[in-house]
Image (spheres, rainbow, N blue to C red):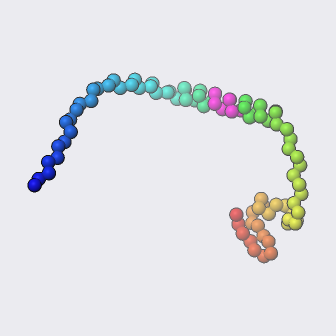
Amino acid sequence: MRSCTMTPPQTKRPRTAKPAAKPRATKAVIARRIREAGERALAEAEKRRNGAEPGPEPLPELGGQKGPEPTRYGDWEKKGIISDF
């Protein structure tokens, strides 16, 4: 016995109008937008700096190495082991 499979009828979709494409921004428009964004960022940073309160002084390190911070000045040396970060 053969099984009979039916395919659904093909229906055509109605055509819809494509949305209008946005005009491309010119280099001058892009440069203006970037400049305006930079000015906004600088104004916001200045506002935050002026309103910020100074934090407490950091506590001194207990049991640390003597001298400058080794991780800031190249290789780190402790008990003969040198490790470059």
Query: Disc count in the image?
Result: 0
Q: Eyeballing the image, is 38 above or below 1?
A: above
Q: Nearer the viewer, residue 33 or 31?
A: 33
* Residue 29 image offset from top left, x and y in percent: 54, 26
Q: Eyeballing the image, is 1 above or below 39?
A: below
Q: Residue furthest left?
A: 1
Picture quarter containing residue 20?
A: top left
* Residue 57 image offset from top left, x and y in percent: 89, 49
Picture quarter containing residue 76?
A: bottom right
Which corner quadrant holds the N terminus? bottom left
Dominant SS of magenta comes to helix
* Residue 52 image offset from top left, x and y in percent: 82, 37
Picture quarter containing residue 70?
A: bottom right
Q: Is residue 58 magenta?
A: no
Q: Which residues are magenta?
A: 36-42
Q: Residue furthest bottom?
A: 80
Residue at 84% over, 61% down: 68
Residue at 70% over, 66% down: 84
Which corner quadrant holds the C terminus? bottom right
Residue at 20% over, 35% down: 10
Q: Nearer the viewer, residue 56 or 68?
A: 56
Q: Is residue 20 left or right of residue 65?
A: left
Q: Is residue 51 left or right of residue 20?
A: right
* Residue 51 image offset from top left, x and y in percent: 82, 33
Residue at 77% over, 59% down: 72
